[in-house]
Image (cartoon, rainbow, N blue to C red):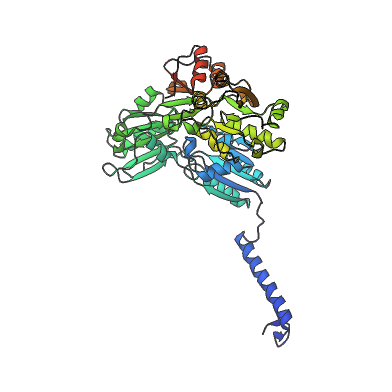
């Protein structure tokens, strides 16, 4: 029997069942309220904003985790280091606040204390804040200090690990940190100490040093004094996992001179031990051609080599949709609708929806797609391509159309402003009546930096990429091989005096 507390000889007195239930509920609510406050740290009020300490990986943008990628695309605020892959920032929302907080070798744009304060300030604005850090947040990345700042300010935080350059750079440099025949242990160390004390080498078969370019002479001296033989192999992997990666090798006896002669740059990861001898045999990344892609869809060409994606054009909406909307509102007279890019698909349906229509407006119109990627894009709008050429190009589409009778047929091409006319001319020669609907335009954009000393090939995917490249760089550097996707692109390159070949 539940009772009610009172002051007197008897502590409890009987109450009715109705009041017993009320008391039980109140006691339970008080219990859970206490437990919840305890979890938050004695009742401290937490900010509604949240900080994510995200590891961006070692340099190759594709090496970020799936979770990290998603958080970048959702963040309200992104605070990023200097050495993150800049391609990742393209994923950010258009309205996201993106702030560089520096972290260059030997100097910082913003002191760590200010970064901590900025994290707290932005999170208190009740947004999602991504602190995008090179490598892994907790491995020589000061992530622990930033996490402590969040705890002290009652800011909720989460850590998203990243691939550290301490392991990724040796991997891309052809040097496995461990190997049954060479090394059964590996130790990671930083060559930069906050207290400026002497760096003591750890004990292991393989040593990996980060942030050590400025102190490598002192590190090697310490290794020699600790008993490491002068003939011990050492390799520096400069810009590890990036297209401009370079591996500089030597021994403890010769490396300082070798590094000076090679003008070793930051960032670089140093690997010390017998495993360096495997570099020649296992250098898989160094053997891949480095391909500059000034167009879009780098995922389509990764099998060709290391794609250096530096887009020079961006697809944007038209300023005046009057003509396009008039055509899209009356699609029924056409026999075929032809899409030559995924951008055409996206902008076509954007305008179709804008005028209150959807895929049903196509009615009995048949649809042709230039390639598999474009066909997949159409599927997303509930449309299956009736024609998909084996050769993914305008030439391939013409071949497919010549297999059927297009005499007198009405064909509508979806295209950008100032697009190539080869497909239109070819269909007209086959007897078709060809119209075009312009649904978007290409504009030139300022690309990220590229070092042509590390570029082996250039791949042009459209005439607009050829023109944009020449506008930006003037000419193709000597020694760089050029490939073109499709005959119209090759024709455009040839018109400008560029010696090129069709992409096989």
Q: Position of residue 11 (x, y in %)?
A: 69, 84
Q: Position of residue 216 (x, y in %)?
A: 39, 32
Q: How many marks?
A: 0
Tell me: residue 23, above or below residue 491.
Answer: below
Q: Quadrant where the N terminus lies?
A: bottom right
* Quarter of the view holding residue 211: top left
Tell me: residue 472, above or below residue 92.
Answer: above
Q: Is residue 98 left or right of residue 504?
A: right
Q: What residue appears at the point 67 percent right and 47 percent down from the top-left corner?
A: 126
Tell me: residue 140, above or below residue 450.
Answer: below
Q: What residue appears at the point 56 percent right and 43 percent down from the top-left corner?
A: 70
The residue closer to the viewer here, 30 or 461, is 461
Q: Position of residue 301 (x, y in %)?
A: 46, 30
The residue closer to the viewer here, 457 or 373, is 373
Residue that protrudes farthest toward the bottom in the picture: 9
* Quarter of the view holding residue 325: top right
The residue closer to the viewer here, 274 or 374, is 374
Res. 452 visible in picture? yes
Q: Is residue 237 left or right of residue 364?
A: left
* Quarter of the view holding residue 121: top right
Res. 103 visible in picture? no
The residue closer to the viewer here, 183 or 152, is 183
Tell me: residue 395, above or below residue 212.
Answer: above
């Amino acid at each position: 029997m539940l009772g009610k507390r009172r002051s007197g000889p008897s502590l409890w007195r009987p109450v009715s069942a109705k009041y017993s239930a009320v008391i039980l509920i109140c006691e339970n609510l008080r219990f859970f309220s206490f437990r919840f406050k305890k979890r938050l740290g004695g009742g401290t009020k937490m900010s509604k904003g949240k900080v994510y300490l995200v590891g961006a990986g070692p340099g190759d943008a594709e090496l970020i985790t799936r979770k990290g990628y998603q958080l970048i695309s959702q963040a309200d605020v992104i605070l990023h280091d200097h050495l993150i892959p800049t391609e990742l920032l393209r994923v950010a929302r258009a309205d996201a606040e993106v702030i560089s907080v520096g972290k260059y070798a030997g100097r910082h744009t913003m002191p760590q204390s200010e970064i901590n304060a900025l994290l707290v300030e932005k999170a208190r604005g009740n947004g999602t804040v991504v602190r995008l850090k090179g490598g892994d947040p907790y491995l020589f990345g000061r992530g622990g200090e930033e996490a402590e700042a969040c705890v002290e300010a009652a800011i909720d935080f989460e850590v998203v690990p990243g691939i550290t350059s301490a392991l990724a750079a040796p991997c891309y440099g052809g040097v496995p940190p461990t190997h049954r025949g060479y090394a059964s242990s590996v130790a990671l160390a930083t060559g930069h100490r906050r207290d400026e004390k002497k760096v003591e080498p750890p004990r292991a078969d393989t040593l990996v040093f980060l942030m050590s370019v400025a102190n490598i002479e002192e590190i090697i001296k310490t290794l020699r004094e600790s008993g490491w033989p002068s003939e011990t192999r050492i390799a520096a992997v400069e810009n590890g996992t990036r297209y401009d990666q370079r591996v500089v090798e030597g021994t403890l006896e010769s490396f300082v001179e070798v590094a000076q002669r090679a003008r070793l740059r930051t960032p670089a990861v140093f690997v010390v031990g017998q495993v360096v001898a495997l570099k020649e045999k296992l250098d898989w990344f160094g053997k891949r051609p480095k391909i500059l892609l000034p167009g879009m869809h780098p995922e389509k060409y990764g099998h060709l080599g290391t794609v250096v994606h530096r887009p020079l054009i961006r697809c944007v909406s038209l300023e005046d949709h009057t003509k396009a909307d008039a055509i899209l509102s009356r699609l029924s007279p056409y026999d075929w609708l032809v899409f030559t890019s995924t951008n055409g698909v996206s902008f076509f349906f954007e305008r179709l929806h804008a005028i209150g229509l959807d895929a049903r407006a196509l009615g009995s119109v048949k649809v042709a797609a230039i390639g598999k990627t474009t066909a997949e894009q159409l599927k997303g709008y509930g449309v299956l391509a009736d024609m998909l050429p084996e050769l993914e190009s305008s030439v391939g589409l013409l071949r497919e159309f010549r297999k059927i009778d297009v005499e007198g047929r009405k064909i509508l091409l979806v295209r950008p402003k100032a697009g190539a006319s080869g497909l239109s001319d070819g269909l007209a020669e086959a007897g078709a009546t060809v119209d075009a609907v312009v649904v978007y335009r290409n504009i030139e954009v300022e690309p990220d930096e590229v070092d042509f000393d590390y570029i082996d090939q250039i791949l042009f995917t459209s005439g607009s990429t050829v023109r944009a490249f020449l506008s930006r760089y003037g000419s193709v550097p000597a020694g760089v091989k050029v490939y073109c996707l499709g005959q119209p692109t090759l024709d455009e390159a040839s018109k400008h005096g560029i010696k090129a070949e069709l992409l096989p």
